[in-house]
Amino acid sequence: MGKIVRLIIVTSMIALSVVFLYPTYQWFFSGMSEELKVAAVQPKEVIGQQARVQAQWDVQALEALVVQSRENPSQMVTLPEELGYFYDYAKQTYRLAKVAFPANPSVPDLLRFTQSRDELIDFSRNYHGQKVLDVKRIKERAFNLGLDLAGGLGATLRADFTPLVEKLEREPNVQEINDAMVSAVDAVRNRADRFGATEPNIRRQGSDQILIELPGEQDPDAINRLVAQQGSLSFHLVNIEQTNLMAYYFSQNPTAIELIDTRTGRFTDTNILSADYLIFPYSVRDKFGEEEFRGYYVLDAEVSMAGSHIKGVSIGSSDFGEPTVNFSLDNEGAVIFARLTSENVGRQLAVVMEGSIKSVANIAGPIPGGNVQVTGFTPIEAQQLSIVLKSSGLPVDLSIINIQSVGPTLGAETIEAGVRALLFGFLLVVIFAVAYYKGSGVQASITLLLNLLFTLALLSSIGFTLTLTSMAGIILNVGMAIDANVLIFERIKEELRAGHSRKVAIERGFARAFSAIFDSNITTFIVALFLSQMGSGPVKGFAVTLAIGIITNLFTAVYISRLLFDMGSDWFRAQNISIGYGASVRPVDKSHAKEERKLPFLRLAKMVTPIGLLVLAGLWVGTFTQKGFNVGVDFSAGLSMNVFIDGEGSLVAVQDALSSVDNVKVVDVDTRGYFRISVPESSEENFAGVTEQKIMELLRGQFGEANLLSSEFVGSSFSEDTISGALKAILGSVVLILFYLWLRFKRLGFSLATLLGTVHDVVFILGFIGALQLEVSSATVAAVLAILAYSLNDSIVIFDRIRENGQNLRFGSRIEDIINGSLSQTLSRTILTTSSTMLAILPLIIFATGSVQLFAIKMMVGITVGTYSSIFIASLVYYFFIKRRDGEHFAVEKKRVVAKGSSQA
């Protein structure tokens, strides 16, 4: 593929990324009016109501100016800027009247062709409402912020399929369970819309769970309202005669409306309206979601058909392009509906739910078969009816297994910390790359920037919810992305030292680095794949970010980086490569090429490894002397609270204040007054709410001022799922990665050495966590697996070089020399990638708090241990394996096997 085509592809991707990220820029960074942003996150119904109020004020102001202008004709009355949009209204009315619009119209001229005041209010309302809706559309395309960034309320619900089993009278199959979950998610989402939730994020998680996030919500009862069984939906025949009589009665007796029981639809005075009838209000919603009252309808009290018979709902269009609402019924419902429509042709049928009529339709004829199509709607009315029908009752029972609450103050602080960590991490890596690789470091920085751009654009395109853990994933990607550049640059430098030209060095450098880059990224992708299946929201966000970062990293580091090098060679006629200093890029005399420096790594490993194992044993002794691990609530079930106490609050003082709470555990997060309080789950009714209230009352009684920053309740079933998911993620990742490595290398020694090195890393980091009593949470699993992937990357690069040197006998035939030489060759890469990743993670330790800071600390220690194990432990294990199998000297056999191209070492 030519450079022009490649450049066009890259440029197109950059442009597309900018398009995806532009709404995020508009929402967060363009200086958009805060008033508009606050209005845009409200439900459409509220937007419409606020727009109507503003319209009435504007029309009153305009009318006052008209009066002023008429009372003082000689005085020039001008229209204020905020009312300038009425010029557009006036131009429309003049155009309809086929009259030329005046060049300098007076204020009264603007209303010359106005038909009514309501017309003016409607125009103004549409103007204000549409302005907010345009901003709302920008918000919908921008990054969603998770609860830890935006603040709010979240929960995880578990589905019980018993109602579905009872309805089917058998165990449901996979498709029926999937349909039930889809309906349950729709029902919960529709309830959130009806209750006026601001920007709710409701989605399925796993096979039987629903994740709910309500940004900005602080009332815990909001979750209960979404889960509690709603009033059932039902179909009733409309009695037109009684409806007309009641309309006349209300016109003569307006206060009689108060006799309607809004909950049951009964009219208190049965002398006026018999108990055989119900009376409900009927309203439709406009494009803003605001209800327009259509009057009171009298219905037959007898339920014509229950909503529980509805199976599926969709919106379609008729042969004439009109919106239709289509729904299907179960077998029993099909029979009922066929009889109902056959016997009542010409009558109206109303859909009733929760004390109001949601839709009224004419029965045009019999409808057999259970497939119903309802016509005569505007698009908005069709959408509203489909929402109502989908909410006709949950096909499953839902229970709350996890609740999380984050205060707005903590959310704002978390955003600031995350942005700082990302910026500083990126800058540190860029400075490091430029300082070490000079001009090529600048090029690497460009690819890093594009990697970040493409990652964010892909996340934005899939509607990703950004959390602090996903930001940590982005930061980690920045550090790991430099690894591919380092591999390529170090290979190019080797080719330059071998005396090759710029073009040949680039060609061979990329070719020889690719296998190690590909293998290391595949193993990390496997880790991300298993992490994404754990089910935990924050961990899943981290995994998705990691996976997408791997894809963009491969593209930018290999494809774009090569394009930049080729452009320098062919377009700018560059003869040299700015990629290092002095001897690192200077050609070496070929007569001394085999005298490359080999550090005695294996000899060092034999001395260092026992010391490392003693440290490892000491960590586990420390863990067990402190009664094991400090397990978080997501593994143990219970309530966890993050509290800030401003003043004299100390760990001992807080513990004393909460001494009356059974099994309470208090940890001081830092020295600034932040504490994490946890209580194991008990059988007490409303355990989370009661315990949280009791703790805050005790703290405020003792210290006066105590702020609840966030809280999380984890039920026992949720914690069991988390433990199960963690074990599956760790074991599944290790098994699949080792299988992949065996397929790639076809060498048992490599796989065995990698396995033992990986086990060492996991055991070491767990011992470190236990000895220091750091909290073990789902984020810990993410850290362990990320460390595992990082350590594997190191091992893959080293073993890839051992395989290469074993084939060309660059360091002779002794396996010890080959391993020492390979470790010496890759040492600079190992140091550089470890340092760059640590530089990216360091700002997280400095700026972040809580679980993300702990995650960064675990990662920092784990990366250090992983580097140590890949250099000393994995290589030593491989050496002993080969020595035991083939002996110390196998030079002749090795050469013979290599000559045949079938080396198995």
Image (cartoon, rainbow, N blue to C red):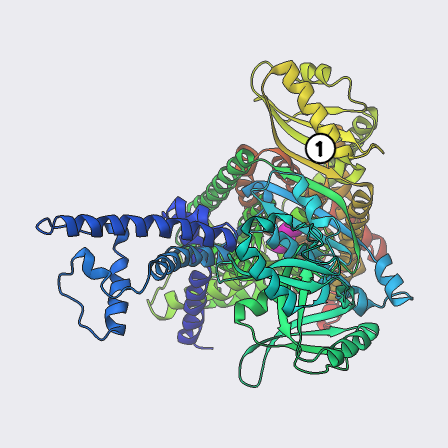
Q: Nearer the viewer, residue 479 or 191?
A: 191
Q: Is residue 503 above or below residue 260?
A: below
Measured from the top left, where is residue 73 in percent x and y? 11, 52
Check if residue 541 falls in the magenta segment: yes
| Residue 670 in view, yes or no | no
Q: Is residue 79 left or right of residue 264?
A: left
Q: Establish if 67 lies above or below 392.
A: above
Q: Position of residue 451 (x, y in %)?
A: 50, 57
With respect to residue 610, does 197 lie above or below?
Answer: below
> Among all residues in the image, which is located at the extreme bottom?
319
Q: Is 895 left or right of 40, judged from the image as shown?
A: right
Element type at mark 1: strand
Where residue 13 appears, as percent x and y from the top left, is 46, 67
Report whether residue 740 is seen.
yes
Number of residue marks: 1
Q: Which residue was labeled with disc 1?
A: 640
Give the side of residue 43 with respect to residue 22, left or right. Answer: right
Q: In x, y percent, where is residue 342?
A: 75, 81
Q: Residue at x 47, y 40 (%)?
A: 424
Residue sitting at x 58%, y 58%: 249
Identify the amino acid type marked 1: Ser
The magenta span reads 540-544
| Residue 106 among those drawn in magenta | no
Please give the name of the residue rendered at 78% of the width and 22% of the height, measured from the top-left corner: 661
Q: Quadrant of the C terminus?
A: bottom right
Within-10-Å neighbours for mark 1: few <14, some 14–19, many 20+: many
Magenta stretch: dominant SS?
helix
